Image (spheres, helix red, strand yellow):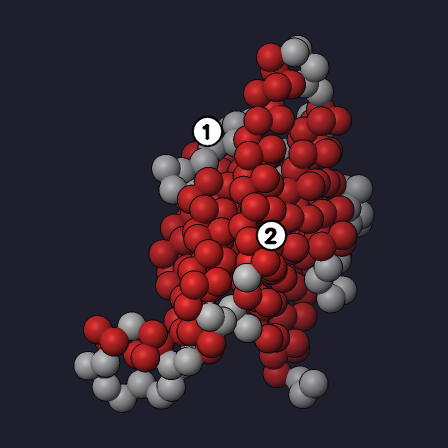
């Protein structure tokens, strides 16, 4: 119980301080590009730590990695969108507010009902769904993961891509190059994901934005490589990860 209470207060503090630091900087006229870089770097680390905390709470085991993915991908795409639009646009329902609220509510709920609720079949956790036939036993946390992807990640990432496409089209640019910039970071840093490595990737994109570098693929990231080859290489690398035996 004490652990869950600490997690709840920790998430509340993260949410509060992440919201007020920018307001305080603007109020005191002390905002700076370095402050923005530091703020988003801390957010990148928080994505990993919060995924680990929730994975421990819900007894997800190795599936904790996918909770990290659904936290990291929207944040990464929001940073990518900010790079092109010069505005950090958050939808009405977003991760920094409603997302974190759901996390500390999940910690509070787990403290009340026990962590076993997350690993039992979802039809036992939600008796109203007992009528669903022909579906094998699925842990509740996996069903929650699926609903978060469908209801949260997919709409958010689609919203990011739509906003970037509007800017690229207005500038008569190439959407292909914009997408290649995102994939190039993943292709270059294809080592096993870690919070520090990924915060560095986001930091590179934020720094490029603050320095007003040209939009599109950065020559400093992967020099002398055509963008088409980057996309093909990334697709081939991803396919090998799934096809080759571990």
Q: Is residue 236 or residue 136 the one in the foreground? A: 136
Q: Is residue 148 left or right of residue 56?
A: left
**Measured from the top left, where is residue 224 in percent x and y?**
79, 49
Q: Quick check: can you spot residue 59?
A: yes
Q: Quadrant of the N terminus?
A: bottom right
The label nearer to you, 2 versus 1, is 2
Q: Is residue 41 or residue 56 the one in the foreground? A: 56
Residue at 59% from the left image edge and 39% from the top image edge: 13
Q: Residue 153, located in which quarter of the rendered image?
A: bottom left
Which numbered tag is attached to residue 170? 1
**Measured from the top left, where is residue 182 in percent x and y?**
62, 49
Judged from the image, the secondary structure of the residue bearing numbered disc 2 is helix
Residue at 32% from the left image edge and 79% from the top image edge: 124
Which numbered tag is attached to residue 6? 2
Dot 1 alpha-carbon crowd within 10 angstroms: few under 14, some 14 to 19, many 20 or more: few
Q: Is residue 185 left or right of residue 51?
A: right
Residue at 49% from the left image edge and 47% from the top image edge: 100
Residue 150's place in the image compared with 121, above or below, is: above
- Label 2 and label 1: CA atoms lie apart by 48 Å
Which numbered tag is attached to residue 140? none
Residue at 71% from the left image edge and 27% from the top image edge: 35
Q: Please, which residue is most extreme toward the front here? A: 2
Q: Quick check: can you spot residue 160?
A: no
**Measured from the top left, where is residue 145 in percent x and y?**
45, 66
Q: Are marks 2 and 1 in contact (CB under 8 Å)?
A: no
Dot 2 alpha-carbon crowd within 10 angstroms: few under 14, some 14 to 19, many 20 or more: few
Q: Along the polypeptide, which appears first: circle 2 or circle 1?
A: 2
Judged from the image, the secondary structure of the residue bearing numbered disc 1 is helix
Residue 104's place in the image compared with 82, above or below, is: below
């Amino acid at each position: 119980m004490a652990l869950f209470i600490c997690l709840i207060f920790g998430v509340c503090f993260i949410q509060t301080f992440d919201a007020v630091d920018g307001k305080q900087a603007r109020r005191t006229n002390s905002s700076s590009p370095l402050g923005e870089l530091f703020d988003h770097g801390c957010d990148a680390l928080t994505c990993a730590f919060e995924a680990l905390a929730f994975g421990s709470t819900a007894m997800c085991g190795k599936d904790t990695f996918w909770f990290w993915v659904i936290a990291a991908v929207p944040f990464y795409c929001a940073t990518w969108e900010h790079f092109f639009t010069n505005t950090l646009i958050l939808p009405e329902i977003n991760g920094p507010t409603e997302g974190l609220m759901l996390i500390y509510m999940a910690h509070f709920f787990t403290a009340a009902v026990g962590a076993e609720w997350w690993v039992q079949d979802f039809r036992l956790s939600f008796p109203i769904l007992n009528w669903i036939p022909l579906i094998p036993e699925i842990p509740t946390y996996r069903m929650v993961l699926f609903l978060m992807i469908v209801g949260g990640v997919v709409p958010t990432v689609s919203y990011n891509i739509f906003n970037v496409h509007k800017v690229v089209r207005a500038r008569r640019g190439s959407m292909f190059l914009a997408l290649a910039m995102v994939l190039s970071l993943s292709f270059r840093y294809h080592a096993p994901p870690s919070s520090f490595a990924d915060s560095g990737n986001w930091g590179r994109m934020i720094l490029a934005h603050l320095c007003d570098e040209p939009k599109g693929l950065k020559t400093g990231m992967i020099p002398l490589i055509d963008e088409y080859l980057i996309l093909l290489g990334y697709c081939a690398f991803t396919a090998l990860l799934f096809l080759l035996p571990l």
